[in-house]
Image (tube, grey):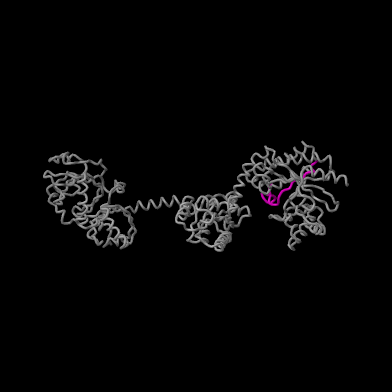
Amino acid sequence: MTSQPCLTMSSSTVGNDYSVLNQLSNPIWIFDFDSRSIVWANRNALTLWEADSLEELIQRDLKSGMSAAVDATLGYYKSKFEKGEQVRTWWTYSPKQRLKRKLCQFSGFTLPNNKQAMLVEVISDEFSLKRDLENSIGSNLSLLFKANGQLSSCNDYFKTCFHQGINSLSELLGSKREACEWIARAKSEGEFTAEIEPHIDNTLHCFRVFAKWFDDRQQLLMALTDISEQKQKLLKANFQATHDELTGLYNRRGMLEVINNSVEQSDPFHLVFIDVDRFKQVNDIYGHHIGDQLLRKTAERLQGILGKSCHIGRFGGDEFLALIPEQNTASIYLKLGQVLRKTQLPLSLETLGDICISVSAGCSIFPGNAEDADSLLKQAGLAMHQAKLNGRNRYHLFTPKLMEDQRRKVHIRHRLSRAVELNQFTLAYQPIYDVVEKRFRGAEALIRWHDEELGRVAPSEFVPVAEETGQIVNIGRWVLRKAIKQVAKWQKEMDHHFTLSINVSQIQLHPGFAEDLSALLQKYDVAAENIALELTESCSVLNCGELRGWLEDIAALGVKLYLDDFGTGYSSLSVLHNLPFNVVKLDKSFSLTESESNRTIIATTLALSKTLDMAVIAEGVETESQQEFLKQQGYRYLQGYYYSRPVSETQFSHILSEQSANH
């Protein structure tokens, strides 16, 4: 049966002659409220009612089989017609004991004797217009309850749908207290709508309920629309909107909802930002399908570590977020330690086998650190990035100082962008002493920055920012040009054995670096042997294959190569014999303390360096006793405050002049 437009009929339209209704294709009939019988029907309605004739249909006894619930429903419809309103709903009836269900439009109709009747127009069957169910006031599931909450009646369709049935309102609602509240509310308000989720026939259902109180009957009529399917679709849509498809964890939106809910409820918690270390390398080497497997396994591992009491989400990429209910300081340290240790255990991936990873974590606290989700996220993220800066595979708790440092870092980044143009950089020079010849045989060029707003900014502050933003390329180019130009000036005042070492960041290195350096040497007419480049130990490990070729190109020019900060990274001298370094600079941390382990490292570094035909410079010499110990160990080249702090160009020129005069 196809859907037809709904017609609004009245007694004025039809008059005493119902023949006009026979022209309509929709089944239509007129129901008399007083006799509870059909008094007229068009031809299509006779077919629907399976009646042989209009006379036979009029004679049918509809009243005796009518439940009290249906009777109350009809009474409610009549009251709406008296207000000039119509009703559109699903209606169930049983001609010749066969259950039928149609979407109907009910309208008030005045019979020739001025009695109130109801005009019924069938709009559609159950299958073609199910979407209209959501817009109707009910689905023809009718229940009638007494004032004490006991079930008085239910319609046949309810009995057909649910075999188990119910006996009381409290059984339907699952609570005696709630049943009493519904009765009281109905008496007070007259009628209201609500949603309920009862268990009937051992199955959870969801109904939209229209409740109507009849004072004259002292009864509560409830018309139920089954919206279980729509509810399931809504729940599924909500789940998909708030959960990550790859891992099944909350997604960014879902975690934000969880955090905001906890904040609104004032439930203290720790917010932990977790990032998989070097995840990009996994994707680059093995492909994204392996990366996806790794993320799924990591998600499962985190769920196992943190447990059901914690909310976990994938915040994006390789970043996870966990909301851990409030714990004391010792407990959160223990929990974060478990995260670090257990995520390092091998993960078994299809087609690849076992793989090991590590994570870095940052933690903020509600309400201790902040009282809104955005701030807590920023704080946890800052703490996580600090953990990465500290070496990865560790955790860090947020402190206000981290935020202060971040603000300063942003300010530094902004001011740094124009520092070269504004000529704000200078070079300082720290001499390197030869204890055998008792003279300075070289110096290290150190960059200095004084900004009008920030004041004097230490290299340890601005160099990492410059490397992170790529500004180090321009800054490094300036340092090379300035230092080589300065050497050209000093070559007239010093012997050819003097060497100036210049710090170079790994970001500056590229295939054409040696060619650029050669051009500078030629431009300022500086001998290559008077220049050395210092690279940190970590740089020599990263991208070692590419690095070797670049370093060999530099060494081919005659420029010396120093390995700076040795002992603080991951290399050992045994792997450096394939790299063209001339000098190892032992990190100052070993010279400053005289522990037994440091003494061993000092002696071992010198012995291995001699074996590899590399010179060694000990940094950080500040006292005479340190100098004497290093001399006894066989160290020839020393650098530190004991000899000289970094000095300006003018001061260092004076040092050179005095040294030339004395030799």
Tell me where residue 161 sits by quadrant.
bottom left
Tell me where residue 178 sits by quadrant.
bottom left
The question of residue 534 being in magenta is answered with yes
Left or right: residue 5 compared with residue 415: left
How far across and down, in percent of the image, does residue 540 sit? 70, 50
How far across and down, in percent of the image, does residue 392 sit? 61, 55
Left or right: residue 64 compared with residue 205: left
Left or right: residue 309 compared with residue 357: left
Q: Nearer the viewer, residue 239 or 375?
A: 375
Q: Is residue 444 above or below residue 306?
A: above
Q: Quadrant of the N terminus?
A: top left
Whether residue 532 is visible, yes or no, is no
The question of residue 208 being in magenta is answered with no
Left or right: residue 187 compared with residue 337: left
Residue at 48% from the left image edge and 57% from the top image edge: 311
The residue range painted magenta reads: 527-546
How far across and down, in percent of the image, does residue 310 sit? 49, 59
Whether residue 85 is visible, yes or no, is yes
